[in-house]
Amino acid sequence: MTMPKVAVVQAAPVLFDLEGSLEKVRHWTALAAGEGATLVLFPEAFLSGYPRGLSFGTVVGSRSAEGRADWLHYYKSAVKVPGPATDILADIARNFRVTLVIGVTETGESGGTLFCTLLYFGPDGQLLHRHRKIKPTAAERIIWGEGQGDDLLVLDTPSGRLGGLICWENYMPLARMALYEQGIQVYLAPTADQRESWQATIRHIACEGRCFVLSANQFVQKNMYPERFQNELEGQPNILSRGGSAIISPMGEILAGPLWDQEGLLTAQIDLEEVIKSRMDFDVAGHYQRPDIFSFSWTKNSSSFPLR
């Protein structure tokens, strides 16, 4: 019987400061490992911040010079994959012997496009996988390009068969199905969605996929932003992201959280045999799939980029 302990981090990075944010990754990973966790999940765009409330000088039909300067500031806090920041993340995963999964803003190959990315590191420090968000939402399309979608993979790890989608990718039924068909056991849903309705989404995914669901969000206050952005945030509430991180069972039961209005660490011991038991009466990729009625295909390319 495999019963790993998993952890979800709800915190803010040092916004738009890569070096400072990496130190927070080390801090929270140490806390999680100290509680016995073998899997640690950080939120969407934790390195180095989800730019909630910022426009980067854009309206339909025009962009401002000041907004381009703000975007450059944000760009400079992004992560090159592989690169110096991923070397540090690998070292953190290796030192604490955890599978580390973290949302980053990634610099693309062109040198002018950013991606919203999820990185997976094994307990030996190996960079296992990279998933780029396939559809940034609304104004996110100004700052992030679209991933190719050939990286919707589930990985074998010491904490179970692991995979995930970023924020509103989780509203895409066919993207979820690509993970279900690979026998996912632990489903990761890092997000920036702080709405109460997100809780219904992650509980639904757990019930639909008959898998454990881990959702991590940031807790962010307005005064955490650099001074250069404070005027643009005038009139916004002090708490810009309430969090709502949680851990859900394959039957949709809440195992930990949701955590609101503070930084914190959620942990849960999970029994992977509960996944099998839960699929007795509903198996979305098995007896409930009905391939005689519906057809589904997706592109799998696990060598879509060199990890090392």
Image (cartoon, helix red, strand yellow):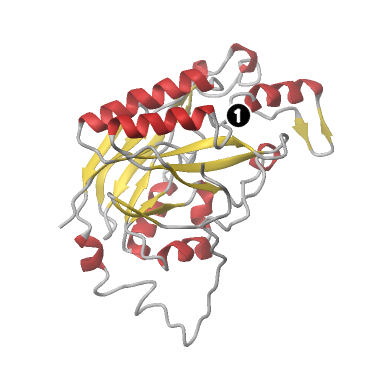
Residue 55 against residue 246 in the figure, above or below: above
Between 67 and 244, the one nearer to me in the picture = 67
In the rendered image, residue 25, in percent from the top left (x then y), is placed at 40, 27
**Extreme residue in the bottom direction:** 292
Q: Is residue 188 left or right of residue 84?
A: left
What is the residue that sits farthest to the left in this orientation? 1
Q: Is residue 98 above or below residue 166?
A: above
Quadrant holding the N terminus: bottom left
Residue toward you, 143 or 76: 76
> In the image, what residue occupies the spot 61% across and 41% down?
115
- Mark 1 nearby-residue class (10 Å; few <14, some 14–19, many ≥20): few
119 vs 263, nearest the viewer? 119
| Residue 202 spot, x, y in % from top left | 39, 52
Q: What amino acid type is highlighted by mark number 1?
A: Gly
Based on the displayed image, in which of its 4 quarters is residue 102 positioned?
top left
In the rendered view, tell whether residue 186 sits above or below residue 141. below
Above or below, 248 relative to 233: below
Residue at point 76%, 20% (across, down): 66
Q: Answer left or right for 10 relative to 114.
A: left
Does residue 126 appear in the picture of this structure?
Answer: yes
Circle 1 residue: 53
Q: Position of residue 101 (x, y in %)?
A: 41, 41
Q: Residue furthest front?
A: 308
Instruction: Name which residue lies at 42% across and 68% down.
Output: 181
Would you identify the image quadrant in which residue 253 lies?
Answer: bottom left
- The answer to whether 136 appears left or right of 174 in the picture is right
Residue positioned most to the right: 61
Residue 84 in the image: x percent, y percent? 52, 27
Can residue 48 be seen here? no
Element carrying mark 1 = loop
